[in-house]
């Protein structure tokens, strides 16, 4: 009988595979079959390293082991692959190798000393702490995944907060599943506050077509998170303060070259009105210009500046 162990979280009961007894049994078998450390095997005269969390096998071998049809086995493996539970590498020369995604969630990483009776002792206190840290991290991630799953259901049922509809109706293009997952992860990071994520989408939408993408939304949300925003009220208060600072910036007094403020003359309201109502001076006729010129020449002669006058004429 093989020794060793794997970790199974209670959250597995929330997983879709729990509902199918046959698939659950096959999945646990794949976990148990996977290498808990790297191993070298000989394939067609070539030494190949099968890494930790991997298993070199074939659909035929698994179908015989599970007493099932190869088509059923292939369908099951493809289903796991589609749900990012395993990756599969196939080649005619080297056969089929599957790898368990996030294998450390199922197999501890602490080195152990095995006694003759089959008991295990952790080598150091540090490895125990490391093992516990990985467990906590795994639990935290699984809880977050479950929360995101529930958020997706709630948001899809709430047209006011349907990120996908807003995204596709406001010039962002078709929303990719990974983009929706990332937005839902942000909702979780903001303690379930969906409105603040929708606000980020609205702000992005107002910036123009070249800004309507996830990268810009992500930039806004990172900024808000770093500033400790938790609600829409926090965002609105910050925007109001920004407007005040902009007004103060543009209303600062100007300074002359002596670094003294230039006095801003405040004109009375009637100034513009008087300027508009002031009568325009009529233009001179040709005769009036000629008479004015003659009068000017006469004055210049009397002043004894005739030479200067001739130079100008």
Image: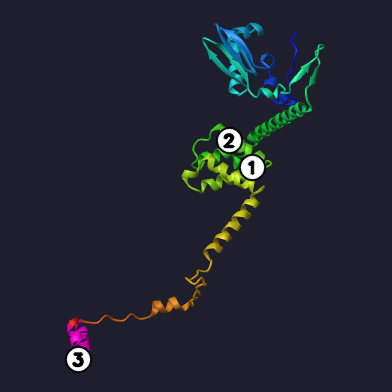
165 or 28: nearer the eye?
28
Which residue lies at the image location 67% right of the left edge and 20% below the top edge? 17
Distance between the alpha carbons at the discs numbered 1 and 2 = 12 Å
Residue 36: give x, y in percent of width and height. Answer: 68, 17
Q: Is label 3 in contact with label 2 (beta carbons under 8 Å)?
A: no
- The circle drawn on residue 301 is 3
Q: Nearer the viewer, mark 1 or mark 3?
A: 3
10 or 295: nearer the eye?
295
61 or 41: nearer the eye?
41
Q: Quick one: SS at disc 1?
A: helix
Q: In this picture, is 82 found above or below 167?
A: above
> How many circles with numbers are drawn on the protein?
3
Magenta segment boundaries in residue numbering? 286-310
Residue 98: give x, y in percent of width and height. Answer: 60, 16
Which residue lies at the image location 63% right of the left edge and 14% below the top edge? 55
In the rendered structure, does residue 288 fall within the stretch colored magenta? yes
Disc 2 packing (10 Å; few <14; some 14–19; many ≥20): some
Magenta portion: prevailing SS class: helix
Q: What residue is disc 1 on?
A: 194
Q: In this picture, is 278 found above or below 3?
A: below
């Amino acid at each position: 009988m093989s020794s060793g162990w794997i970790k199974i979280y209670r959250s597995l009961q929330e997983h879709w595979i729990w509902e199918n007894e046959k698939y659950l049994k096959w999945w646990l078998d794949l976990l148990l079959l996977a290498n808990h450390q790297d191993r070298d095997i000989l394939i067609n005269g070539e030494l190949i390293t099968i890494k930790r969390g991997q298993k070199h096998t074939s659909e035929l071998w698994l179908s015989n082991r599970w007493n099932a049809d190869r088509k059923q086995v292939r369908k099951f493996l493809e289903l796991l692959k589609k749900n990012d539970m395993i990756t599969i590498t196939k080649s005619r020369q080297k056969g089929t190798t599957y790898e368990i995604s996030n294998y450390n969630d199922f197999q501890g990483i602490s080195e152990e000393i095995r006694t003759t009776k089959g008991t295990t002792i952790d080598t150091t206190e540090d490895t125990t702490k490391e093992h516990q840290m990985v467990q906590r991290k795994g639990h935290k991630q699984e809880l977050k995944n479950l929360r995101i799953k529930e958020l997706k259901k709630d948001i899809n049922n709430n047209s006011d907060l349907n990120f996908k509809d807003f995204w596709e109706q406001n010039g962002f293009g078709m929303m990719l599943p990974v983009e929706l997952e990332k937005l839902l992860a942000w909702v979780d990071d903001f303690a379930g506050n969906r409105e603040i994520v929708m606000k980020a989408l609205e702000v992005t939408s107002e910036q123009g077509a070249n800004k309507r993408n996830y990268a810009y939304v992500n930039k806004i949300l990172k900024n808000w998170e770093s500033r400790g925003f938790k609600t829409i009220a926090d965002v609105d208060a910050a925007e109001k303060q920004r407007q005040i600072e902009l007004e103060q910036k543009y209303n600062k007094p100007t300074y002359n070259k002596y670094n003294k403020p230039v006095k801003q003359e405040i004109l009375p309201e009637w100034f513009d009105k008087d300027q508009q109502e002031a009568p325009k001076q009529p233009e001179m006729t040709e005769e009036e210009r000629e008479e004015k010129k003659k009068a000017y020449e006469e004055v210049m002669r009397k002043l004894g500046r005739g030479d200067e006058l001739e130079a100008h004429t």
